[in-house]
Amino acid sequence: MVEHASQSERLFERARRVIPGGVNSPVRAFGAVGGTPYFVASAAGSRLTDVDGNEYIDYVQSWGASILGHAHPKVVEAVRAAAARGTTYGAPTEGEVRLAEEVTAAVPGCEQLRLVSSGTEATMTAVRLARGVTGRARVVKFAGCYHGHSDGLLAGGGSGVATLGLPGSDGVPASAVADTLVVPYGAVPEIGPDVACVIVEPAAANMGLVPPPPGFLEGLRAACDRAGALLVFDEVITGFRVDRAGASALVGVRPDLFTFGKVIGGGLPLAALGGPSELMSALAPAGRVYQAGTLSGNPLATAAGLAVLEQLSQGAYAELREKVTRLAAGLHQAVSAAGLPVQVPVFSTLTSIYFSDEPVTDYDGAVRAAGTGLYAPFFQAMLERGVALAPSAYEVAFCSLGHSEADIDETIEKAAEAAKVVAAGR
Ligand SMILES: *Cc1c(COP(=O)(O)O)cnc(C)c1O
């Protein structure tokens, strides 16, 4: 059944000897869906080829980092040219300035940008900055939102933390989360006078996709203003994916701080933290909140990011939105026709699939949907048919500009077959 696994199986066995669990990020191990992860040999556009020569239409796209599709010629050329000039210097470059100029020009309210190497670093620094400027300790986050793997933000995390069913993580002392308050997504919580910041994914995309309910983000903005707390939008997924100006512009709510990642690095390790100059100038060396990084603003990463941003016109988002709308409608039709319970929420260019009779509005709902156990067999039936979805019920499907209409129609066709197989096995 899993013919593709031979080379992958051998590599996974070798990997497990020298890498904990065989992978360098937990969800990649296929623990939640079973089977052996495919080891990738190469990829181009919408397609990925594994080491056994199997080809898949890829909806992981490096968890959203590849918005143009894999190995886009402009990105490859930009990285090649940058590499020839040296891969890292530990001194400032023009590329960093240009990328910061592009991002600040695109995102209202984001006047300055600090480049880092991962989303984890970006959110960790946002929290430190919020604490530094407010002189307060407490952080409010929402269950099912994922903000990277720093100690204080892991509690109630989505993504891999949800996939593994962990309440947080061993190795995080109680003191590290003593100031983290986890509340349900979609409802505006009480914000006390000790709260430094409220951090939120403006559209939650690490527990499947939960778009913000009407009034939620506006309510958070007002509650933060009343309490003197900062509002942080974690746009590591939504930034430059749902719109060139991000989710904040789409929903019309401006946070105090933004975090970006994934898309803006063009597939290389790069993320960022941004906001008004008045707040950002509290970061060292301008201010007294320390943050640093050997590879921060790496010249290959800024070259890749700039090459990607150059392609992301308003027209590109309209095109991507059209593709995602087509995919979501087709998936919904294909799966419900097989008699399975299904929800396919859409927020601009993001979508996900829940096997649920009711719309999923928070983490409890996402857990209930995952609890039907229908995602894993659907995932496997899709993979056997050459469609690679995320190996977890708690992730979204990332469509890229490299996905053609034919790719999407083929995906829907396979989904109809896969859903029948799953329905027959119930
Ligand atoms: C992926 C993600 C992160 C963490 O980014 P890494 O680069 O994996 O550290 C943080 N926040 C959100 C919303 C994410 O999706």
Image (cartoon, rainbow, N blue to C red):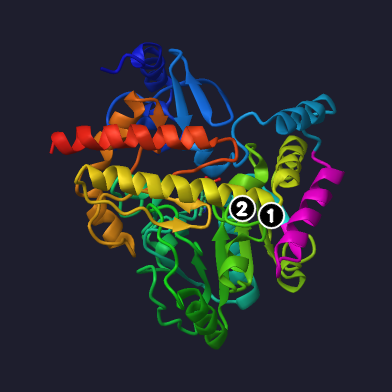
Q: Is residue 40 magenta?
A: no
Residue at left offset 49%, top offset 20%: 49
Q: Quadrant of residue 29?
A: top left
User: Residue 126 placed where, x, y %?
Assistant: 60, 62
| Label annotation for residue 397 | none
Q: Is residue 261 visible?
A: no
Magenta residues span 90-113
For mark 2, give the secondary structure: helix
Q: Is residue 6 above or below residue 413?
A: above
Q: Is residue 225 above or below residue 399?
A: below
Instruction: Find out whether the residues at labels 1 and 2 contact each other: C-beta distance under 8 Å.
Output: yes
Q: Is residue 183 visible?
A: yes
Mark 2: amino acid: Ala
* Disc 2: which residue: 318
Taking the image as shown, residue 142 lies to the left or right of residue 282, namely left
User: Residue 394 placed where, x, y %?
Assistant: 36, 48
* Disc 1: which residue: 314
For mark 1, give the secondary structure: helix
Residue at left offset 65%, top offset 37%: 268
Ligand 1 is within 8 Å of the C-beta of the residue at disc 2 = no
Q: Is residue 105 magenta?
A: yes
